[in-house]
């Protein structure tokens, strides 16, 4: 989906967002009241009205009379001089539209005088190009260190360590506390990135793939939890479990943004074997369990992240006391110290049996059920 591609969303926001200032100033005038405006994706067209879904998820209706000026702007452009004259009949469902009304109009009652359109076909083309770029030039993993002086970020992706070199031109974004959807991400900074954060980067890779000159970095602070559920409160949207790694009882909120999936039994058995037996290959007898096991769990987690969005979805009502779960949770929620489930997997009994000190390290996690992380980048 277009709204789940980080670069695309931000370039659309930049392009049409800048038009809010440019078109609004031209329509309203210096001393006049600010013109009403609406920005969103076309949901329906009837007569001379267009129904938009705004980026905040609201549904609004805009009247577009025959006297309105309609312009088509290239995706990502911020220069209104490059826009081409268009007409109402060219607007289609799926297009991005900025409608600006007369001075004094309100967003709730808007008759457009100027309409700026970005075509859905152009949006889809850009999305495909950027997804291909993420697949070819994207990496993902857990942050192990950050050097503020040089801008270098080191991440662990499975058994590999990758250095992400950033500059003043690198675009930083930060996932929201309760969501890993790209449309919810906010502008970020290098200073916000800490060890143990989960991170994805896109840029120019070195020949061995162990260094990336980053054009874009998106990160978030998340925790991996695993264990047996101690309680489930579907009405309140809360679950508790005793985390295998920390041995602490943890309460986790489950929200509409949480992606709950059931892992098929055959898949769970395969990953259990991979994280247990496979982790000892290449390690000495003394450090096999610690070094090899952790490396194998991380490698398995990276593989798993590419499969999660194909697992059957479930709801909190399908969870029961005693179920084995693995969770990626945000470290903040509505209340300080609250954990919120981002991705939750059930059916993981074989994995936790094989790894009694904790499940797999999902170093590249499922992005909101529809956007996979890792080296594939946003989907």
Image (tube, helix red, strand yellow):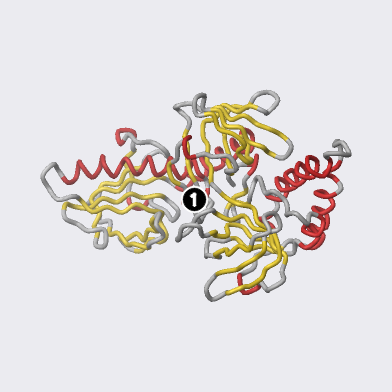
Left or right relative to 240: residue 88? left
Image point (59%, 54%), residue name: 370
Residue placed farthest to the bottom in the image?
235
Dot 1 lies on which element? Answer: helix
Left or right relative to 31: residue 184? right
Q: From the top left corner, tell me how far across and down residue 260 is, in percent.
A: 63, 63
Up/down of 157 relative to 264, above or below: above
User: Which is more toward the observer, 159 or 67?
Assistant: 159
Image point (58%, 39%), residue name: 195
Up/down of 202 relative to 71, above or below: above
Q: From the top left corner, tell me how far across and down residue 96 is, in percent.
A: 40, 49
Up/down of 88 relative to 259, above or below: above
Q: From the top left corner, tell me how far across and down residue 70 is, in percent.
A: 30, 46
Image point (16%, 55%), residue name: 104
Up/down of 276 relative to 334, above or below: above
Residue placed farthest to the right in the image?
285
Figure disc tally: 1
For mark 1, what is the residue?
A: 3
Left or right relative to 349: residue 54? left
User: Which is more toward the observer, 357 or 182?
Assistant: 357
- The answer to which image quadrant residue 309 occupies is bottom right
Circle 1 packing at 10 Å, graded few (<14), some (14-19), many (20+), is some
Image point (64%, 60%), residue name: 248
Q: From the top left corner, tell me how far across and down residue 113 is, in percent.
A: 23, 50
């Amino acid at each position: 989906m277009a709204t789940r591609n980080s670069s695309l969303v931000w370039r659309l926001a930049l392009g049409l967002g800048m038009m809010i200032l440019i078109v609004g100033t031209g329509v309203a005038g210096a001393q006049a009241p600010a013109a009403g405006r609406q920005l969103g994706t076309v949901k329906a067209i009837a007569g001379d009205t267009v129904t938009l879904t705004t980026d905040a998820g609201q549904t609004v209706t805009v009247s577009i009379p025959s006297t309105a000026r309609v312009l088509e702007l290239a995706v990502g452009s911020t220069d209104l001089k490059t826009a081409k004259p268009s007409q109402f009949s060219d607007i289609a469902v799926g297009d991005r539209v900025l409608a600006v009304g007369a001075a004094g109009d309100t967003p709730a009652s808007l008759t457009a005088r100027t309409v700026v359109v970005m075509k859905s076909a152009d949006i889809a083309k850009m999305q495909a190009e950027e997804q291909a770029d993420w697949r070819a030039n994207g990496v993902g993993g857990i942050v192990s260190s950050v050097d503020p002086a040089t801008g270098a970020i080191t991440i662990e992706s499975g058994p590999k360590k990758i250095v992400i070199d950033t500059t003043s031109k690198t675009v930083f974004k930060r996932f929201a506390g309760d969501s890993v959807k790209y449309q919810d991400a906010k502008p970020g900074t290098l200073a916000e990135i800490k060890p143990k954060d989960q991170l994805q980067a896109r840029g120019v890779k070195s020949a061995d793939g162990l260094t990336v000159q980053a054009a874009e970095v998106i990160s978030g602070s998340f925790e991996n939890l695993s264990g047996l559920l101690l309680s489930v409160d579907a009405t309140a949207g809360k679950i508790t479990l005793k985390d295998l790694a920390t041995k602490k009882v943890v309460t986790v909120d489950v929200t509409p943004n949480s992606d709950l999936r059931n892992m098929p039994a055959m898949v769970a058995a395969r990953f259990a074997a991979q994280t247990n037996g496979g982790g000892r290959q290449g390690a000495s007898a003394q450090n096999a369990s610690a070094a090899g096991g952790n490396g194998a769990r991380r490698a398995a987690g990276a593989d798993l992240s590419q499969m999660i969005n194909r697992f059957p979805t479930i709801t909190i009502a399908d969870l029961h006391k005693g179920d084995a779960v693995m969770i990626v949770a945000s470290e903040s929620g509505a209340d300080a110290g609250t954990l919120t489930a981002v991705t939750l997997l059930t059916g993981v009994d074989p994995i936790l049996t094989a790894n009694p000190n904790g499940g797999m390290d999902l170093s590249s996690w499922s992005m909101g059920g529809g956007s996979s992380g890792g080296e594939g980048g946003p989907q």
